[in-house]
């Protein structure tokens, strides 16, 4: 009798554990492979304006881009490198530099549309940092 009870408790325990892990976002994030898809945490720039976000996952995992479609011609593999350049501006994007190399309205949505998709705002950034501990650049 005691044995059956123990087995039942164990069963419920295992079952709820399985359900929990199946529904948890954390589980999905654990499976994200940084070697295959690049850094997990979004990169957030502060200069020239605050709160511009770049997410590797969207580009590599979802849009299936290779690392060398951006590295190292458009971007160095170092968060914050581009924002040290004076030409990291919308004007350069509109001319096809940096993000604008793809965000030109044909490969991906144009840089002069959907401003808030890249510019997530100070509140959006706070939310993002809270959720993922994004790499914030402040120099
Ligand atoms: C669509 C463009 C794009 C693609 C594709 C891409 N990256 Fe990146 N990557 C960036 C940008 C933008 C940065 C930030 C550079 C900066 O701030 O100057 C970056 C930064 C990095 C960094 C530095 C992170 C840090 O915290 O310093 C690493 C490492 C990296 N990428 C690896 C990869 C790998 C591995 C792949 C392929 C699986 C990849 N990237 C694909 C755009 C891209
Ligand atoms: C090598 C091409 C390429 C480069 C360079 C690139 N992107 Fe993208 N980006 C894409 C593609 C493809 C998509 C998905 C299709 C679309 O949304 O139009 C995308 C989607 C996005 C999205 C939409 C995410 C969503 O949830 O809808 C954002 C935001 C974004 N990119 C920001 C950036 C920023 C910021 C940069 C520069 C730091 C950048 N991208 C550079 C190709 C690129
Ligand atoms: C594909 C992503 C993307 C889109 C879309 C985008 N931006 Fe930007 N924006 C950037 C990046 C990257 C920078 C440079 C990094 C920074 O300032 O933090 C930047 C910088 C800026 C700056 C400061 C530099 C400058 O050019 O004066 C302004 C202002 C700006 N964006 C306005 C806008 C407006 C307005 C829109 C919509 C019409 C827009 N952006 C759409 C990515 C984007």
Image (tube, rainbow, N blue to C red):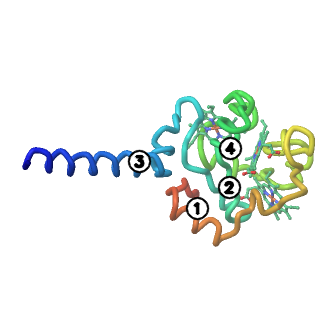
Looking at marks 1 and 2 on the same chain, the residue that comes earlier in the sequence is marked by: 2
SS at mark 2? strand
Instruction: Assess whether mark 4 and mark 1 are in contact (beta carbons under 8 angstroms).
Output: no
Kindly identify which numbered label has been placed on residue 57.
Answer: none
Does 26 sit left or right of 99 as displayed?
A: left
Judged by depth in the image, the label closer to the viewer, 1 or 2, is: 1
**From mark 4 to mark 3, how far is it between C-alphas?**
23 Å
Q: Which residue is mark 3?
A: 21
Q: Which residue is mark 2?
A: 53
Judged by depth in the image, the label closer to the viewer, 4 or 3, is: 3
Judged by depth in the image, the label closer to the viewer, 1 or 3, is: 3
- Horizontal and vertical percent for residue 120? 71, 64
- Horizontal and vertical percent for residue 24? 46, 51
Instruction: Assess whether mark 2 and mark 3 are in contact (beta carbons under 8 angstroms).
Output: no
The yes-or-no answer for disc 4 within 8 Å of ligand 2 is: yes
Question: Which residue corresponds to the image point at 65% horizontal and 36% vertical from the top-left?
Answer: 61
Quadrant showing the C terminus: bottom right
- Front residue of 29/15: it is 15
- Horizontal and vertical percent for residue 92? 86, 49
**From mark 3 to mark 2, how far is it between C-alphas?**
29 Å
Looking at marks 3 and 2 on the same chain, the residue that comes earlier in the sequence is marked by: 3
The relative height of residue 52 versus residue 59 in the rendered view (above or below) is below
SS at mark 1? helix
Instruction: Assess whether mark 2 and mark 1 are in contact (beta carbons under 8 angstroms).
Output: yes
């Amino acid at each position: 009798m005691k044995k059956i009870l123990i087995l039942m408790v164990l069963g419920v325990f295992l079952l709820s554990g399985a359900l929990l892990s199946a529904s948890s976002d954390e589980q999905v994030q654990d499976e994200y492979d940084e070697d295959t898809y690049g850094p997990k945490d979004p990169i957030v720039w502060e200069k020239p304006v605050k709160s511009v976000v770049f997410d590797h996952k969207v580009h590599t995992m979802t849009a299936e881009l290779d690392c060398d479609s951006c590295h190292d011609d458009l971007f160095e593999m170092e968060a914050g490198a581009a924002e040290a350049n004076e030409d990291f501006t919308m004007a350069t994007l509109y001319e096809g530099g940096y993000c604008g190399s793809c965000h030109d309205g044909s490969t991906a949505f144009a840089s002069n549309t959907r401003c808030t998709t890249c510019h997530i705002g100070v509140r959006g950034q706070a939310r993002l940092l809270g959720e993922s501990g994004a790499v914030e650049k402040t120099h």
